[in-house]
Image: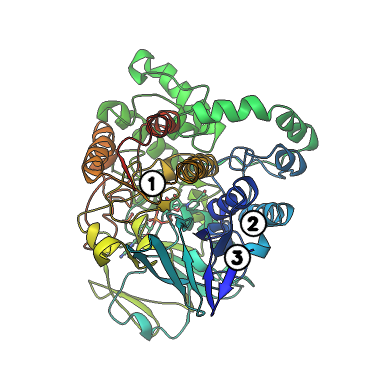
Amino acid sequence: MTEQTNSIIHTDAVVVGAGFAGLYMLHTLRDKLGMKAEVYEAADDVGGTWYWNRYPGARCDISSYHYSFSFSEDIQQEWSWSEKYAGQAEILDYLRFVADKLNLRDDITFETRVISSDFDEQTNRWTIKTNRGHTVICKYYISGVGTLSTAAIPSYPGKDSFKGDVFATSSWPHEGVDFTGKTVGIIGTGASAIQAIPLIAEQARHLTVFQRTPNYATPLQNSPMDDAEANAIKANYGPLRKEARAALAGVPFPNMRESIFNDTPEQVQEHLEDCWNDGGFALWLGSYGDILFDEKANAIVAEFVRNKIRARVKDPKTAELLCPDYLYGTKRQPCETNYFETYNRDNVSLVDIKSNGINQITEQGLELVNGDSYAFDCLIYSTGFDAFTGPLFKLNLKGRNDVRLQDYWRDGPRTNLGLMSNGFPNFFMITGPQSPSVLFNMPLGIEQHVEWIADTIRYMEANGIETIEPEKAKEDEWRGVVEGIANSTLLPKTNTWYTGSNIPGKPRSFMVYLGGGAAYKQVCDDVAQNGYSGFLLG
Ligand code: N01
């Protein structure tokens, strides 16, 4: 149990967030390391991203048996997934099951936000304060706040004047929303909106989609899982996880071919068609090895997807508006179910806001730059996130010499391995910027980070080490590694939230390590085996 004196709580470790990351971190600290730990969570339940993103159609685009914890054979065997790609409610139920099974709730304080985090150089301890008056002092401070948990809602003129109901896909009402008989406007056509739009269109009287950039969405090809399939997976989890960890993005794509130019045009079309039918990320991450490196290879897949869109959308003008022209796969590829057919409905219209942007939000709806105005009962923002750094900055971290993380990262994140930052000793970031994070299977990436952090803490405790933080020079080196790998691909050529360019004024830097989970793990393990080379131990 954590000690409490004069309403100040003293504990070994504080973890922020009770999603995949926070839950496994708590279990590891408490049940494997025997430490005292406190978890603070803003929501009234576990689940993290799967607690908040409850919009219609919210679903994971990685198959359920890959997008799940691998650390417990009991959990793997006891839990059964009902669909190949699990919906939000089922993933949330899974995380509740994990929390209950491991008895984690007792050490989680819900409905509580961290509001400040200060490092004391005299005592080498963090003092953490919450919006509910807690003051906690700890040696180890671990963020499990996630990468996509701070919504980015554009600050249009007149934003608060709209008289109808306003929703955001990133924090959907728990009781759901009934759009029957309503007119609805939705801004944004990213992965979230592409999942939500077909279902909202089925309910609403009229849906107007405001699109700035169309996307290369490909079919998810979801299906129910029967007992025979589930049992076969359960009997095979060992090899399945091994294969996933070895795969670049943490999900195996066994049909990947090396280069699109090794095949004849007919073979290419046939293979792309097979990947399209396999569904999920098969076309993006599992078709040809050169499509994210070579513009000519990329163009072939881009045109393949555009032709699919043209074949599915009846009105040629609408079809062309839905055809992207940026480099295929340089934005996160959304997965869809009936998305393009939705535009064949009489009650759905698509408005291009690239050439004619939103000028202001009005009492009835919104107005575009050319003066066109639209009225509706409900307005939905599906406009993305201040990714990676947004949630970390909300912790209001002050490290050595009272330096704020926001100031230290003025020109973009400075980390070693995406795990720690100089001047912020003993502060660990699970799936932090410059780690594989969003471009690796999240639960497996989280497990690797949690286990590395736990080993580091074990090492520190065994060797009487009070503090660990990266050398400053290593941070420059690591940024060079991350950006060097990214620049060898086509991804940085497009403005995306991977580079921070979706947020006005955010410094541009590529924030994901693209070398693959296995290579990344090797680097992390080598650092540890070499006595934490590149880190300062105090
Ligand atoms: O957000 P987005 P999202 N005016 O940033 C538009 C994960 N996810 O919530 O492209 C007008 O992709 C913006 O337009 P543009 C997944 O990693 C996972 O959809 O910037 N429009 C875009 O269309 C995903 O990548 C699952 O031109 C504006 C949209 O809003 C990530 O979440 C499922 C605008 C934002 O799209 C984010 O997806 C769903 C403005 N001022 C999501 N600002 C899983 O399967 C932004 N837009 C696990």
Q: Is residue 221 above or below residue 130?
A: above
For marks 3 and 1 on the same chain, the one whose residue lies earlier in the sequence: 3
Expressed as whole percent of the image width and height from the top left, the position of residue 29 reads: 58, 50
Mark 3 to mark 2 CA distance (whole Å): 28 Å
Q: Give, as a three-letter code, the residue at label 2.
A: Leu
Mark 3 to mark 1 CA distance (whole Å): 26 Å
Viewer-closest of 30 and 219: 30
Viewer-closest of 427 and 220: 427
- Left or right: where does residue 5 sit relative to residue 499? right
Q: Which mark is residue 419?
A: 1
If the image is split into quadrants, where does the N terminus sit? bottom right
Q: Secondary structure at mark 2?
A: helix
Viewer-closest of 7 and 178: 7
Tell whether label 2 touches label 3 (CB within 8 Å): no
The residue pinned by badge 2 equals 92
Q: Is residue 382 above or below residue 284?
A: below
